[in-house]
Amino acid sequence: MMMNSPKISVIIPIYNAEVYLHGCVDSVLAQDFIDFELLLIDDGSKDSSGRICDEYAEKDSRVRVFHKENGGVSSARNMGLDYACGEWIAFVDADDLLRSAYLSEYSRHLDIDADLYIQGFEDSEGHIWCYDKHYWTGDGMACQLSCLEEKQLNRLVWNKLFRFSIIRNFSIRFDENITMLEDLLFVYQFLFYTKSVLNLPVTNYFYSVHVTSASFRKHKFSSWNLLLDKFHEIFSVLSERYSEYALEQQKTFFLLSLDVVRSLYIDGLKKDVRIPFLRKIKVRGQNNQLVKVPRMYTFSNNVITFLLLYFPVTVTDKILYFINKILFLIR
């Protein structure tokens, strides 16, 4: 542990990132603001990433390296939280870059006394994601920040500075059993305990966009199922005071559930997995007045929603099973 606790702990989860790692770490170490520690979490890399991390630790006392067995990005970030010493937490992805003013932009606004600071970002395709300077206070912060959703600024962890005492005191962690949208879940859990947020209209974070498949099939059903349950729980709590916002969010995740329903049949999951999931989604759809058949955006969504809302689950399952068989034959 460092003799004097740094102001900010920067956590970088790393897995087979040797191509990008020098650029990323160099951009952190070149920050105008210097009162920080850099935690490099080598998540069982098979390339030279671990060695590169150790070389940085030998050269700069602000760098601490932790090597672990591969467990995924959430596991790596959690290890960073376990060993962080700063008052504030910043996450950076190993293939991204920071402009030199990234941390100093946060530090010069710390006297405003927010629990969470947000910056915009620029991506490698030339898009700029930014929002006007704004300070929010009070309860229901997730609802208050809904204006940031269009700019995607509220769903990421790497464009934010988190007050570490809130993370520590309420045991907020990344769920290691969830392999998608883990950032969004972490942010929502943090916002439950947040009383003030400051958004800064600057773009000092450079996000590297990679062409990846959006297929639901690359994630386990158990992970999707858990994710949907977690968000349903969050919005059920919010619905007590922010019903309109909660219903809109629950509708969004109902639509996501329909994609998971399709994957159940495409992947050939067994009936004893399909039926409980259909039953659960059916109840959630029936309890949301915004879930209506003509308003589910696509023909496929409307068909599945109609079956879920108006047919017994066992009948719905048989129809979807045979539809998938027919489509498979056509393909």
Image (cartoon, rainbow, N blue to C red):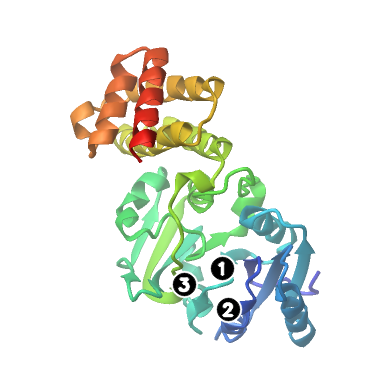
Residue 290 at x, y percent in the picture: 26, 30
Three-letter code, disc 3: Ser
Question: Which of the numbered marks, if any, corresponds to residue 208?
Answer: 3
Measured in 3D between alpha carbons, the distance from the residue under mark 2 to the one under mark 3, in whole angstroms, is 11 Å
Residue 77 at x, y percent in the picture: 65, 58
Q: Secondary structure at mark 2?
A: helix
Crowding at dot 2, Cα within 10 Å, few <14 / some 14-19 / many 20+, comes out as many
Residues marked 1 and 3 touching at CB (< 8 Å): yes
Is 242 above or below relative to 129? above
Relative to 221, 320 lies left or right: left
Quadrant of the rendering where the C terminus is positioned? top left
Residue identified by numbered label 1? 93
Three-letter code, disc 1: Asp
Please tell me which residue is depicted at 51% across the width and 31% down the height of the picture.
268
Question: Which of the numbered marks, if any, corresponds to residue 24?
Answer: 2
Q: Earlier in the sequence, mark 2 or mark 1?
A: 2
* Of the two numbered discs 2 and 3 in the rendering, the one whose residue sits closer to the viewer: 3
Residues marked 2 and 1 touching at CB (< 8 Å): yes
Three-letter code, disc 2: Cys
Crowding at dot 3, Cα within 10 Å, few <14 / some 14-19 / many 20+, comes out as some
Please tell me which residue is depicted at 60% across the width and 64% down the height of the picture.
89
